Image (cartoon, grey):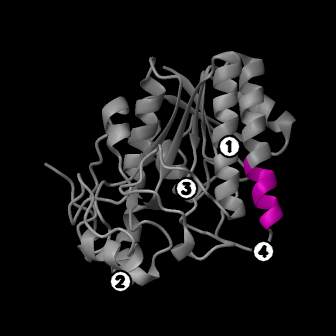
Amino acid sequence: MMKILVTGSSGRTGPSVVNSLARHYEIRGMDLRRAPGLQCADFYYGDITDMLDVQRAIEGVEAVVHLGARSGNSRMDPENVIRTNVTGTYHILEAAREAGVTRVVLISSECALGYAQGRFRPKGQFPLHYLPIDENHPDSPTSEYGLSKLLGERLCRGYTEGCGMQTFCLRPSSILLPEDYSHFARIYQDPEAWDNMWSVVDVRDVAAAIHLCLENRTLMHEVFYINSGLMAVETPASEIIRRFFPDITELPEGLDDRKSLISIEKACRLLGYTPRYLWQGESDGPGEPG
């Protein structure tokens, strides 16, 4: 059974990802604390900004899932967001290279695009080139968090090009835990309340996408948007576009009123990603195909 290091294993989404991946792999967790109920074979207390901690944790594993990061939701310490996310990702990649680990999955963010959390620029001034957004759309982040995630992706590409390491960068939309759905239903149906492209992804679908990356042996460096594939508000996409992107005068080809404005076509095509937990407006949870 492949042994995987998961950094950030005790964060908000870490336990769900670890416990899902534990069905397929031997998991080593790494974080500043150990969350209750974490289903990992062993656990290393450590800080990703400390290279010695990272080197110790990565020894003996075959792949790394890099969840560890500083959240971008707080403006209290923006400098630490850059330091943790960029330096931490560099430490993971360099320690992996030194240890002969050839596969790294980075959990990036849709914030690397620059629409969400545009700290220095109103959302209405985001340089939108086309819809739906895909991986070829130019990135223009202006927040420390978005910049740090984009720099992490660039580091991954450099290690792929420089030493042949297989690197995958997943850009999930707002990640929902199963217990989040009732709260989400109450407060997020107003399109004005959103700071992203009105899309979400269930943490179980994120774990499934990570699993697909870990099993892939053909791709080298790729960036993938990951979400439910559907709009996460009841307002039709055509109305969202009219209100928030008035320069786009008609619904783009390939979009309908329910499809997400961030395309997951590349992940579906190259990874075989198929979201199972689909937000459909119910307050008791996501829909799941039978």
Q: Earlier in the sequence, mark 1 or mark 2?
A: 1
Name the kind of residue labelled 4 in the image. Met
Residue position for label 3: 113
In the image, which is nearer the foreground, mark 4 or mark 3?
A: 3
Measure the C-alpha gap from mark 3 to mark 2. Answer: 27 Å
Name the kind of residue labelled 3 in the image. Leu
Q: Position of residue 71 (x, y in %)?
A: 66, 62
Residue position for label 1: 152
Name the residue nearer the viewer: 94 or 220.
Answer: 220
Q: Earlier in the sequence, mark 4 or mark 2?
A: 4
Q: Is residue 240 above or below residue 132?
A: below
The quarter of the displayed image where residue 267 is located: top left
- The answer to whether the residues at label 3 and label 2 have Cβ atoms under 8 Å apart is no
Inspect the magenta stretch and tell me whether residue 82 lies in it. yes
Q: Is residue 117 above or below residue 40?
A: below
Q: Earlier in the sequence, mark 4 or mark 3?
A: 4
Q: Position of residue 79 (x, y in %)?
A: 82, 62
Measure the C-alpha gap from mark 4 to mark 2. Answer: 28 Å
In the image, which is nearer the foreground, mark 4 or mark 2?
A: 4
Residue position for label 2: 186
Residue 76 numbered tag:
4
Measure the C-alpha gap from mark 1 to mark 4. Answer: 22 Å
Q: Earlier in the sequence, mark 3 or mark 1?
A: 3
Name the kind of residue labelled 1 in the image. Gly
Name the kind of residue labelled 2 in the image. Arg
- The answer to whether the residues at label 4 and label 2 have Cβ atoms under 8 Å apart is no
